[in-house]
Image (cartoon, rainbow, N blue to C red):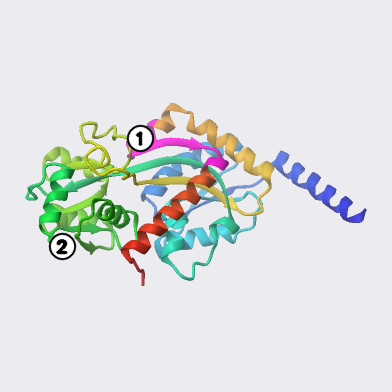
Amino acid sequence: MLKASGLLLAFFACAAAAQTYPTRPIKVIVPGPAGGNVDNVARPLAQKLGELLGQPVVVDNRTGAGGNLGVELAAKAVPDGYTLLLSQSGPIVISPSLYQNLPYNVARDLVPITLMARSAMVLVVHPQVPAKSVRELIALAKAHPDKLNFGSSGSGGAIHLAAEMFKLLADVKMIHVPFKVSTQADTSLIAGELDLIFDGITAAVPHVKSGRLRALGITSRERAPALPEVPTIEEAGVPGYDVVSWFGLLAPAGTPREIIARVYTEFARIAALPEQRQGLIRQGATPAPIGADVFVAQIRDDTVRWAKVIRASNIKVE
């Protein structure tokens, strides 16, 4: 009887907390630098969420270990609704297969709230590369194994894995040249030191429009509004190819369900605002708000998918 009474009291305490939530500022951990891709998505959303909840929502940028540090801090935070995590997909679905001693377990330590947006990449080549299409690039790579090189922002990152999946599905061999950041790879590609890269659409568009780079294919299964004339890699000759990064909102495991529901409701309202949608599109992202159940399935499927690519490509991170 006492145990049942205790559970009942805990239930009413959680319900009361949800009704008064929030009573103080909320922190949104962003596992990336200020001005980075995740930060650019997080800040306008955080500002609007603060307006709707009536409390400041502060973005807390935490860099390090490919985003793992920020995710770890969120996973270990007090689950009271005052610490949230807005992360890109990498630390959630790629890191578990890259790092042997990851200090968090996504399924155990985090609760998905909503997926906010998806972001595709574009396969671009230097004009000196004779291939004018994905099929021609594949034929060139097959004719000259390990002669073409591609850049990335580091081993195990989204750009690198996009290329590795391309290599696997197209059955070609190319050389990986890692850089510390994608802008360095872009500079090297424009200078003709690299042959190709899987680049962010926003970063690539100015160079494609100027003719300094040639776009061959979009990594998602839908064409990009910024480059509508460029086919997807799948329709251009690589069946099954589909690579997107996503931006999702999560909370520490144990956060009251009533608070999770409140946060989701407010974010759904924000996602429906035309100015928010246009802001995401300007950053090369596609608004894609979905609920927790679908988001959980996305995380599970993506984790399995990237684990297969990492194993097949024998990718290791020091």
Which element type, helix, strand or loop, lies under badge 2? loop
Disc 1 marks a residue whose amino acid type is Ile
Q: Does residue 31 appear anywhere in the picture?
A: no
> Gap between marks 2 and 1, in whole Å?
36 Å
For the magenta stretch, what is the residue range? 278-294
Specify which label sits upstream in the sequence, 2 or 1. Answer: 2
Disc 1 residue crowd, few under 14, some 14–19, many 20+, Cα 10 Å: some
Q: Which of the pair 218/87 is nearer the observer?
A: 218
The residue wearing badge 1 is 281
When asked about the image quadrant of residue 77, the answer is bottom right
The answer to whether 241 appears left or right of 144 in the picture is right
The residue at the point 57 percent across, 59 percent down is: 75
The residue at the point 44 percent across, 36 percent down is: 288
The answer to whether 262 appears left or right of 71 in the picture is right
Say if the magenta span includes residue 289.
yes
The answer to whether 52 appears left or right of 206 in the picture is right
Q: Does residue 170 appear anywhere in the picture?
A: yes
Q: Which of the pair 19/197 is nearer the observer?
A: 197
The residue wearing badge 2 is 146
Q: Residue furthest top?
A: 274
Where residue 251 appears, as percent x and y from the top left, is 58, 50
Instruction: Classify the position of the C terminus by image quarter.
Output: bottom left
Count of numbered marks: 2
The residue at the point 25 percent across, 42 percent down is: 233
The answer to whether 75 is drawn above or below residue 241 in the figure is below
Disc 2 marks a residue whose amino acid type is Asp
The residue at the point 42 percent across, 45 percent down is: 246
